[in-house]
Image (tube, helix red, strand yellow):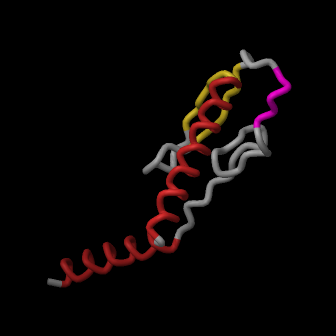
Amino acid sequence: MKLAKAFFGLVLVALMAGCVTSSNQVQPSGTKDSLAQSGPVKSSADPNEIICEMQRPVGSNIPERVCRTRASAEGDRDATQIMLQTINNKSGLRGN
């Protein structure tokens, strides 16, 4: 019985220690993150230039390297802006 109580106590302490520790990770200074971009993509540069960024996929905290052309990044940004404007316009009509 004492062994079971000791085991339960150790499991409880381990769980509490896991809840207390921080999961903040230091990211190398040379990488970019989707949450911390350094401004908009400049359109005056070569549209075929390949840009690689570290991005965290939805549902994960593990960053992945994503490479695409500057033109592709600008196209995705423009499509996202149009989608958000469309959603905002539709919600404004309903009064929500």
Instruction: Work out whether residue 19 or residue 34 is closer to the camera in this orientation and state it.
Output: 34
> Horizontally, is 30 left or right of 82 in the view?
right
Spot occupied by residue 18 in the image (x, y as percentages of width and height)? 44, 68
- Is 47 in front, or is 68? 47
Q: Name the residue rendered at 69%, 47% in the picture.
A: 27
Classify residue 6 as left or right of residue 19.
left
**Farthest-out residue, right:** 44
Residue at the far top in the pictured view: 48
Q: Mostly what secondary structure, the magenta segment?
A: loop
Write down the region rendered in magenta.
41-45
x, y percent for residue 42: 81, 33
- Seen in the picture, residue 69 relative to 54 is either above or below; the reply is above
Residue 40 in the magenta stretch? The answer is no
> Within the image, what quadrant is residue 15 found in?
bottom left
- Which quadrant of the figure contains the N terminus? bottom left
Is 81 left or right of 30, judged from the image as shown?
left
**Residue furthest left in the image:** 1
Q: Residue at x 79, y 45 (%)?
A: 39
| Magenta segment includes 42 | yes
Quarter occupied by residue 43: top right
Image check: 87 left or right of 5?
A: right
